[in-house]
Image: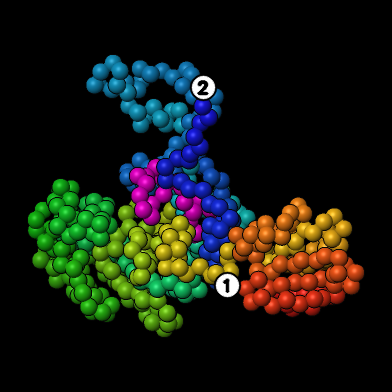
Amino acid sequence: MAQKPSIPKGTRDFGQQEMAERNYIFDTIRSVFRTYGYSQIETPAMENLSTLLGKYGDEGDKLLFRILNSGDAFSGIDYDQFRTEDGDKSYNSKALSLKVCEKGLRYDLTVPFARFVVQHQNEISFPFKRFQIQPVWRADRPQKGRYREFYQCDVDVIGSRSQINELELVQIVDRVFTLLDVNVLIKINNRKVLTGFAEISGFPDKVVDITVAIDKLDKIGLDAVKAEMLEKGLTDQAVAVIEPILTLSGSTSEKIATMRSLMNGGSASGIVSETGLKGLDELEELFGFIDAAGLRSSVEIDLSLARGLNYYTGAIFEVKALDWQIGSICGGGRYDNLTGIFGLPDMSGVGVSFGADRIYDVLKGLDKFPKDLRSSTKILFANMGREELLYVLPVAKALREKGVSVEVYPEAAKLKKQFDYSDKKAIPFLSINGGDELAAGKINIKNLASGEQQSFDKNDVDAMLAFLA
């Protein structure tokens, strides 16, 4: 019996309609990136595992797809060195996998970008502004809006600490979603402020645990976040210092003023956090830039915004669709020393990543795709027979040379079948030419939507173009 075809869970096929819609997203994003001076690069789908491990935290490492070494990867393995104390048949699977897997599929585009910058540092000028639109892979549990293979659209600038770069990224986000006609909320926080949480709580060494817990606030709620922080070793008093920060309300200036007081010794602990105060200074400067620039989208400071990735050091961003229920559709932040792990220290950068697959789901759900994306073909020439076919082929060639997408029906089938074909593909114009048109040297073109029909001289391509426009 023939095998039933299937694809792995968390992946998808994309047909011609879906690809037209996805390319609409990519083309829109790409056009905005370029207006801000960003150039496109690409990196390999797989990286050395040593490049990827340790860059996303323990949870991220677990989601890396590892690639088994080619050939007999397990040949010559001394299994005794991987045995655990649990029994003769128990092995340290993590250590063993590192032995047989030297490569992995990229988890995101930021770490490969950092590797690229270090590897090509003598070939590029700084600040270096680049964008990438490529797929990434995560061994996550598939669910609505979450896939194992998905595209990211990343835009980063590295080699400058100016928050003008943060402003431009916010403007890029605003412009992209304005063009896509999606209402979004841009949330902004600063990782230094999160470090300040840990410092004023009296647990500066728990900043990662606190950040990971806070990052789950929208998913599990405040009580569960507090419970997780207690499980990680924080005291009730420490959690009591952090809790009111997570529920802070008011305008941007009011939130910053309240936080400044808390970071300056005004919390129950009385501890001053210089790092937290520096983060608040950066937030105040960035929101000043944003107010001066003016945006269409809503922007707010969200002090509970954490984003668990370990490499963020300054501003952090997250974008939510306002009219469609789905997770974050865009996010990113400032990283001060990501390239340091590859031997190029003190190279600050900032970037955001657009989640193309989630953006696709939002546009689909809100019916925001342009209707004319249904077909890339502008006009279909019907096939009425060999003589008629030879007559229209030069016309089809001339239109293609002018940039028009043209199809010629391959068989001399019944007209109904050719009409059905154009209807299914949503081809807007149909040209049917028989003996009368050949005798008169004419080309007949019909607008299938309006019913308007015109006849043109066979060589008058410019007139045809005007009708097809």
Is residue 114 in view from this perspective? no
Q: Which residue does the numbered mark 1 point to in the structure image?
A: 35
Looking at the image, residue 28 lies above or below residue 289: above
Q: Which residue does the numbered mark 2 point to in the structure image?
A: 72
Does the magenta segment cover residue 461?
no
What's under tag 2, amino acid-wise? Asp
Figure quadrant of residue 127: bottom right
Residue found 25% across the figure and 60% down from its top: 218
Residue 135 is left or right of residue 375, and the answer is: left
Under circle 2, the secondary element is loop
Residue found 56% across the figure and 46% down from its top: 44
Residue 347: give x, y in percent of width and height. 47, 58
Decide which of 431, 257 is in the foreground and name it. 431
Magenta residues, start to end = 132-154
**Which residue is farthest right?**
439
Q: Label 2 to label 1, Cα distance in Å?
A: 49 Å
Looking at the image, residue 207 lies above or below residue 429: above
Crowding at dot 1, Cα within 10 Å, few <14 / some 14-19 / many 20+, comes out as few
What's under tag 1, amino acid-wise? Thr
Under circle 1, the secondary element is helix
Decide which of 372, 252 is in the foreground and name it. 372
Is residue 358 in view from this perspective? yes
Residue found 85% across the figure and 55% down from its top: 386
Does the magenta segment cover residue 150?
yes
Residue 222: give x, y in percent of width and height. 17, 60
Crowding at dot 2, Cα within 10 Å, few <14 / some 14-19 / many 20+, comes out as few
